[in-house]
Image: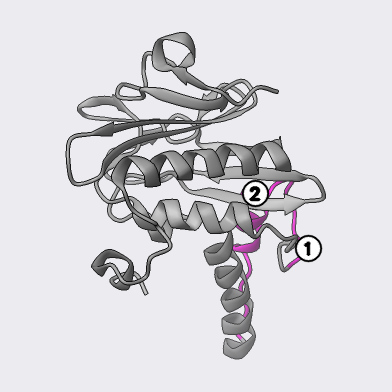
Amino acid sequence: MSEAVHTKNSTASAMDDGIEFIIGDPSDFAIGYGFLGADRFTVLAMYAQDRNLLGFTNESGHHTTRWAYLDGLVAWLKSLASNMAEDPYPFQVEGEFAAQKDDSAREFDTDDLKEFDDYYDQINSWAWDHTWRHESGGAVLADVFFELKNDTVELSWDNRDPGNDLTFDCEFGGARIDAETFKSVVLKFVDAYEKHWGINVDDDSTWLRKSRT
């Protein structure tokens, strides 16, 4: 499959205002982006099977993720794509994808405080490693899980209760993406981000990266 960069008018939805370029095929997996002005202001979309996982509607209309200084998020994606390894959900619970399993797992309760803490420590630690919300930097960002299984990356999401009068386009579900396609698209986006802003997102010497450690 071709992973060329396309202009917004040739492939992206008109709803995703600010998306200038797309890497990949939105009917399979793609990242759309636009770089605006200074302060590393970035407009971001992630497409899985023709759905923008980052699209949302609030009182001012329809948008996709947009924020300044998304270095931490881009660094997280870069690390994920460069170091993918299988790491199954820690408990056998109902659900096809990680987001569904996590929803089921959080129904657990017990009067044994140590057992309760140990259980939730495990699922919270796993969720931290497999989701990107902690690197949002203040942006509106959908909750998406990323899990490698064999030669496939499973993307799944649970955005049914985002608060702040938001409604995400993709509330609850999942999709499977070829792992090599996922890696190639993500790393091409990271390269575009670093080259445009003239930075290396792995540089821990910057004040921005230090603030996240």
Q: Residue lying at the far top in this picture: please name it.
A: 10
Q: Nearer the viewer, residue 149 or 186?
A: 186
Measuring from the top left, give residue 76's x and y in whole percent: 48, 57
Measuring from the top left, give residue 111's x and y in whole percent: 60, 84
Query: Is residue 159 among the parts visible in the rendering?
Result: no
- What's drawn in magenta, residue-wise? 91-111
- On whether residue 169 falls in the magenta region, the answer is no
Residue at the disc numbered 2:
100
Q: Nearer the viewer, residue 9 or 64?
A: 9
Horizontal side, residue 176 vs residue 143: left or right: right
Q: Residues within 10 Å of mark 1 (few under 14, many from 20)?
A: few
Q: Secondary structure at mark 1?
A: loop
Q: Write down the quadrant of residue 165 in the picture.
A: top left
Q: Residues within 10 Å of mark 2 (few under 14, many from 20)?
A: some
Instruction: Tell me which secondary structure the magenta stretch mostly adopts.
Output: loop
Measuring from the top left, give residue 37's x and y in whole percent: 18, 35
Tell me the residue at 31%/28% (across/down).
63
- On whether residue 105 falls in the magenta region, the answer is yes
Q: Nearer the viewer, residue 121 or 37?
A: 37
Q: Residue lying at the far left in this picture: please name it.
A: 38
